[in-house]
Structure formats: structure tokens, C-alpha cells
Image (tube, rainbow, N blue to C red):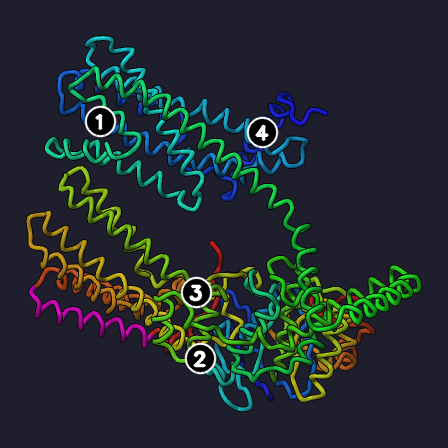
Amino acid sequence: MRIELEKVSKRFFGSLALNGVSAKLEPGQVVSLLGANGAGKTTLLGALAGIVAPEGQILFDGERFHRGRMDLRRRLMFLPDQPLLFGRMSPLEHLAMCVHLYEAGEPKPERVVEVLQNLNLLGLAASAVGTFSRGQAYKASLAALMVLDPELWILDEPFASGMDPGGIRCFRQEASAAAKRGRTVLYSTQILDLAERFSDRLWVLDEGRLRMEGSAEELKVTAGSPSLEGVFLRLRDPESGA
Amino acid sequence: MKLYDRGLVRRLRKAVKYQRKLAKVKGTAIHKRKFSVDRPWLRALLALIFLATFESVQANAVRTRLFLSLLAMFGAVEAVRRARQLYMHLTRSDERLLFQFYPLSGEGFFRLTIERRLIASLWIWGVAAVTYCVASGGEGPWILRGLAFATLTWLLSLCVMFLLVLKPEWLRQWVPASMYILFVILAAASDNLRPAMFQATSILPSGWANALFVWKNELASWAVVSVGIPTAGAAAVWLLQHFRRRILQMEAQAAGVEESVRPLRMAEELRSEMELHSVEDVLAREELLHENQKTESEERSLEQWEKIRQERFRTEVAGYVESRAWLAAWEWDGAPWIERLAAKTLNPQEKETLRYMLGGETPDWSSRWKMGVIAAGVSAALMALDMEATWALAGLALAISVGLGVPVLGGAWPLLGFGYIAGRLSPVYACLPFDFTRATKILIKTALVRAIAWLPAGLIVGGLMAATAEGTAGKGAEIMLRGFLIWAALLPLVAVGQFSKATNDTQDMRLIVLPLTGLAILFGLVLVIACGVAITAGRGCSALCIGGIALISGCSWLLYRRIYERGQIDLQRAPR
């Protein structure tokens, strides 16, 4: 799915959370969204998911996206940092709910088993998510995302979701495979090392503006810094020697 | 070793009380003590009521009967309440749980509990003694008479209590509370109803002594009481023993169920296998299997076995996933009648959406309807008593009935509930492709089915209310019907309200919102006036107003849908 953001802005109680963000996402890309706390990362992800109503335009394959466009809405899935789940539902029931609301066809059982196995969730497949730890609950949501495999994967802080290293590795493998299949993966993170290793492009937001965009190497060259950390610090303080 | 020790029991009870006190201090909703009539202040209040009426009772025979009726009712309520308490204490109280970990036999625990409950039940005896002494009016051996009749009432109440604990499924929490409400209603009954009330309460076992008490032939009354006391006492002891056996048997069954079931199942499996094969074959195969297992168990280490166990478990789960049973749609045909009817109004996609709007939990509409109809019945009964004092209670019962039977504000929909996304309140469906139009359709259809199911009860109560208030029953039923139609016309707005609660439509005050807010206030005023007119005006005018309300409500729904779907509002709001 080709995604275009045209002058997307969002104001919360007088303050600008997003300020004229324009960008493009191509199919098959893994994009990492970076920025300081309060830079507008979650707001931007929310706008793409239809939760936040921004000014400006969001186009999916040239078509204007809004909450009422169920056909477009079903082509993406958003995972917040703390997924909204029913405590009494099991991961399988949650998956069944997603399958129904996304009006997706019945998933292949072997694929479901594979995903649950990889996320170390197979033994808990029929247990209530209310009894899960934070990381396990995130995995339950992630399992639904992986099985449904929408065209646009939107994830808020997947590396700070409480998942164990096994879960994070599984996510990276699955997301990479999805990108190879032409899916677009957009996630926010504060872990720069992971972002550098696991993304084709990086978007750096600062005070609601998209300040930098490109591959990790391009950003380093532009900012004249040997590390992403330096790029980050220079955003805030151009005189910084980092 | 002594099987139970009173000192230990006392210390444990103290520990339980202390834990309860701690939990109360925490003040969490879970630990809050439920309202109970077993409170010293309530007992004192009841005692005061009895004492305050001392003079009036002496002077008035009709009032004597009233107080005897109240005593019978009191005995019955206490018997039900105490039976429930006793059963709960013996089976699922904190003490029961705690004592299971100590060397106290089930029998010991039963004895201790019964001792305590019997002492507590002397309260019934006390109230009865005061009532009978007062009712004797100081004539003859009034103290002895009062005590004898009180003893009989107490023993009969105990019999009822021990009889009821044998049927724990009858001991619902709301029964004693409802009986106490009835007690208050009886107390407020008009003079001409009192003889009938006395007759009615004399049917209760706790009222049998009353029937004897008012006998003209005092000698015969004494004779029956003298025989009645040992008979009731013996019956109480017999019932208590029966209950003891039942409880101990239950405990033994609960403890032994695991051990007893397994060999039984194995025996059954073996028997079925024996039927299929010859005995020699089975024995030879068993021997071979045994040999193999022996070799395997020697070769494999514990870790390997653990791996195998986990692998088998995973295989089982994988088998369940592959069965696709978790993807299967709900069978609404087997649901209770209101749920089934509601499902019939929906198409297959809507049915599945309904399932998830309910959070994957089965709805309880039929059981709520049942409770609503009972509450409507209570309201109607209170109306039929035709007493000023019961009007407020009748109104309350009707309000409860409406609350249970009709989803006035749209009903409870977990998917439309709240959660947090990045520190802001968001609806649970925020991250899912959830169709506004489909959801509101489901909400309106199910609400209508539930309300229509309740409507006959509402019409009857409305009719009775009007008849009691010196109007005509038809007029009351018509007002109730108009109320229903107004609510049905407002349903699109109610559905909008369900969506609105988790959005920032009332928080995000932009310039464009101001004229919209003004318009909403204007619409609101028009709606309120139209509702008033629709209730009070003539039929033609009322129909017109209801049509107008439906139009405004429908237009508001369309407008909100446009705002919602075009992304003019956020699916999140700042927490307060």
C-alpha cells in the first residue's frame, strides 16, 4: 500500500502535536519513527489508524482515508503500546474477533499454530488474556496482526512492550518477511540501535514536525554525526558536539 | 492428637476478623462489606419499634393482631436469612477456607458453627417473648405465657431454617431483603387489611403460635403449646442431624471425587476393551505395553520426559487450533428467548459483530427481563395494596423493573467501553475496523426487542397505577405506551450517546463546534418540549410530536455519523 501524508497537523488543546507533516511510504518498506517524548509519534500513528482526526490529507493508494472508509481501514492494523484486549478472551478468541471485524477469510490453522509457537504462546492459546503479563498480552495482539497480515502494520513502541527477546526476534523476522511480501511496516521506538538495524528508512519527528527522513546512513551524513544518538542530540541542540 | 481445639479456633477466628478489618481499611470495592440486616443498629431500631408501640398494643386488639402478624413475618425472614448465612458459613466462608488448613474436622467445624448460630437465633426468641408478653396485656400468668409462645415460635423458626438449608438453591440473596420490604409494607397496612394479614401470616410456621395465642379457650391453647414445644424441638433436632449428615457427605464427596473417578473411568475403559477383544489378547497386549514402558522409563531421563510432556501438550493445543472450533459462530438458536429473538432480527454479520460488542460474553437479557418482570409484579402488588405509604416503594420497584428490562441508555456494550492508548481514554474498538452504522443498527434492534418484551409488564403496572390514582387503567397504560414510543424515537440519539462517551466531541472546543453546540442545545430544548407534549397532549398531537422526535433523533444520528466517519472527532479523550 502506498501511503501519502499531506500537511498533516493535529492540535490538542491549543498545542500542536503534529505540524504540517508530509511524507510518503512505499510498499515493502520498514520505517522506524523516532523522536523525543511528546514529539508526536503516537499522534501520527493514531492519525494513520483513524483514531486521531488530523487536518490535512492521508492518502492510501491515492484514496483519501478517513474513519468511515472501512475498506481502507481493513487494510491496516494498529497495535498501541498497551493493546486493548478483553480480559476474558483468549488469544484465539481475540484472533477470531479480528478475523471477523476485518472480514478476512478464515486463517490457515497451520499458520496460526506457527505464529503462536514462534511467540511462545501456543500453550496459552486458550487461556484468558486477563491472566497474562504485559508482554504476553502484547504478543496476543501481535499474533493477530501476524496472522491477519494487513497491508500496513502500525506499531507503537513494539520494543518497549514488555516482550521477551524471543518475541522481539519473532516480530523482526515476521515484519521483515512481511515487507518482502510488499507489506509496509511503520513502528515507533526509542531504541536507536534496533531502529538502525531494523528499518529501511527512519523518520525523525521533533515538536510535531518531520525534521529528518532517510536511511540511517543518510541521516548520519546529513547531521554530520557518526551515530544516530548524535543525530538525535543535534536536532535539539545544533551546537552539540555529539 | 485432639482433632479440634477451642483455643485454636478462637485464635483463628480472631485472625479472620483482623484480616477482614484490614481489608475494610483498604477500602477497595472488592473488600467492601455488603449491606446486611444483621447489624446491631438495625436490631436496636427494631427493638425500639416494639417498645414504642407498647402502650398502643395494650389498648387495641386490632393492633395486637398487627404485631403478631409482624412477629410471624419477622420469624420467617429471620429463618430464611439465617439459613442462608448458615449455609454460606459452612460451605464458602473465609473461616471455612482457613480452617481447612488446620486440624479441625468437618464435624468439629459444623458443631462450632451451629452453636454460634443457635445462640444468635435467640434474638428471635427475645423479640417473640417481648411481643407475646406485651400482647398478653398483663393478664393471668402473662410472663409464662409469653415465654412459652416465644419458645414455640423460636423452635418453629429453627425448623424452617434447618429445612431451608437442605435446599440452598432457594436461598437467594434478594429473598430476605424482599421479605423485609414486605415487612415494612405490612407495618404500614391500613386497619381494614389487618385481619386478613393476620390470617395470611398465620399460615407461616412462625405464625402458627399466633393462631394458638388468640384462641378463646386458653386451656386448650396451653395444652397445644405444651405438646408443640417438645414436638417442634424434636423436629428441629432431627432436621439438624439430617443437615449435618448432608453437609459432611458433601465434604467427603468433594474430597474424594478425584480419587474415586479415576479408577472408575479406567475400569470402564477396560470393560469396553474386554468386550471388543478376547481376554488373552488384552492381557498379552497389556504385558507388552508394560514391558515397553519399563524399558523406556529406564532409558529416558526426567528432562526428556518433560520435553515429551510439553510436546504432547502443544500437539493437543495445535489440534484444537486446527479444529477451527474457536472460529465457529455462536449458535443463537439455543440461547434464552430474548437473546434468540434479538438474534433473529440480525443478519449473520451483525450477529457476529453483536458477539464482539458484548466482549465475547453471552448476554443476560432474558434473566434481566425475568427480574424486571418480578420487580414490576412487586410494584403492581404494592399498588394493589392502595396505601399512601407504599406509593414511593411501588415507584421504586417500577424504576428497578425498567432498569432491568429496558436498556434505557442503550445497554452495556464492553466493546464501546474504555481503555487507555498512550495515556488517553479510548474506546476498546478504536484499533479495530468497527462500523458505526452496523453497530448502531445492532444496538437499536436489540434495545427494541428487549423493550418490547418488557412492555406488557409496563402496561399492566401503568394501568394499575392510573386505576389506583383514581384515573382509568386504560389511560395509565396509554401513558406508558407513549413513554415507550418516545424512548423508541430517541433510540438513534441514545446510540450516538454510546459512541460519544469515548470521543472528544465535547472536549475539543474549536470554532466550528460553537454553532454545532448551539444547535444541539436548541434541538435538546425542542426535544424536551416535544416529549412533554407527547405525554400530555391528545392522541393526534402526541403522534405528531413522537414523529417529530424521531425525525430530530434520526437527523442527529445522520449528522453525528458524518462527523464521526469523516474524522472530525478523535477516538480518545483526556482523562479527568
Q: Quadrant of the C terminus of chain A?
A: bottom right
**Residue B377 numbered mark, or none:** none
Q: Dot 4 corresponds to which residue?
A: B18
Image point 6% across, 48% down: which residue?
B470
| Residue drawn at the location 70% of the way across and 70% of the way down | B316
Label 2 Cα neighbours within 10 Å, binned few <14 / some 14-19 / many ≥20: some
**Label 3, label 2: how far apart the Cα atoms are:** 29 Å
**Tag 2's secondary structure?**
helix
Q: Position of residue A49 (x, y in %)?
A: 54, 76
Which quarter of the picture shows residue A211?
Answer: bottom right
* Mark 1 residue type: Ala
The Cα–Cα distance between marks 4 and 1, rounded to whole angstroms, is 46 Å
What residue is disc 3 on? B504
* Dot 1: chain letter: B
Residue receiving disc 2: B349
Q: Would you identify the image quadrant in which residue B60 lies?
A: top left
In the visual, does A206 lie left or right of B302? left
Secondary element at image label 1: helix
Local crowd size for mark 4, using a 10 Å CA cut-off: few (<14), some (14–19), many (≥20): few
Q: What segment carries the magenta color? A: B538-559
Chain containing mark 4: B
Query: Are discs 4 and 1 both within one chain?
Result: yes
Contact flag, marks 4 and 2 (Cβ < 8 Å): no
User: Mark 3 or mark 2: which is in front?
Assistant: 2
Q: CA distance from mark 4 to mark 3?
A: 46 Å
Query: Picture coordinates of residue B53 (x, y %)?
Result: 21, 20
The amino acid at mark 3 is Asn
Q: Quadrant of the N terminus of chain A?
A: bottom right
Question: Mark 1 sits on what residue?
Answer: B211
**Which is nearer the N-term, disc 4 or disc 1?**
4
